[in-house]
Image (cartoon, rainbow, N blue to C red):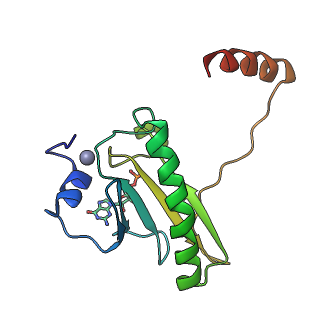
Amino acid sequence: MVKDDCIFCKIMKGEIPSATIYENSDFKVILDVSPANRGHALIITKEHYDNIFQLDAETAGKLFSLATVVARAIKEETQCEGLNVVQNNGEVAGQTVNHFHLHLVPRFKGDNVSVTWKQGESDSNDLAELAKALKKRI
Ligand code: 5GP
Ligand code: ZN
């Protein structure tokens, strides 16, 4: 499926240019036009899926397999010391382009990139209850 008003669908069709690193029948890997750091790449599905809630498990498996290869290429080329894999789903989670994509963000000591959160608190009973409820759904 392709969505006419989707910026990443337009990139897939070649209507918007992109710095492409890799392409196969399922994915296109491009450099982010507003990178958090040099080497920030996006693995984008060729098909339009809004987010993880629409993506099928088989495509997701292939995607993460490709992510390992791309991550190593970015590390070799940029000499980054670390790398964050980030994937936002929904506006509330920071998704700005509603076409599934995985961010690979190379990290360097002293950079000002932030993808962390303040650690919260939990209750052991609630954790146990929630785990039980979720287990039933998987
Ligand atoms: P999100 O916030 O949805 O997880 O990430 C969307 C990403 O797409 C952002 O990091 C943004 O810089 C990138 N982006 C948006 N439009 C374009 C574009 O036209 N070309 C490229 N290469 N990246 C884009
Ligand atoms: Zn799309």
126 versus 33 height, above or below: above
Residue 90: x, y in percent?
42, 38
x 26%, y 70%: residue: 18
Residue 25: x, y in percent?
31, 56
x 64%, y 54%: residue: 116
Residue 59: image quadrant is top left
Image quadrant for the C terminus? top right
Residue 11: x, y in percent?
22, 60
Residue 30: x, y in percent?
36, 68
Is residue 137 or residue 34 the one in the foreground?
A: 137
Residue 82 as seen in the image, left or right of residue 52:
right
Image quadrant for the N terminus? top left
Residue 48: image quadrant is top left
84 versus 1 height, above or below: below
x 44%, y 32%: residue: 53
19 versus 56 height, above or below: below
Residue 79 as seen in the image, left or right of residue 89:
right
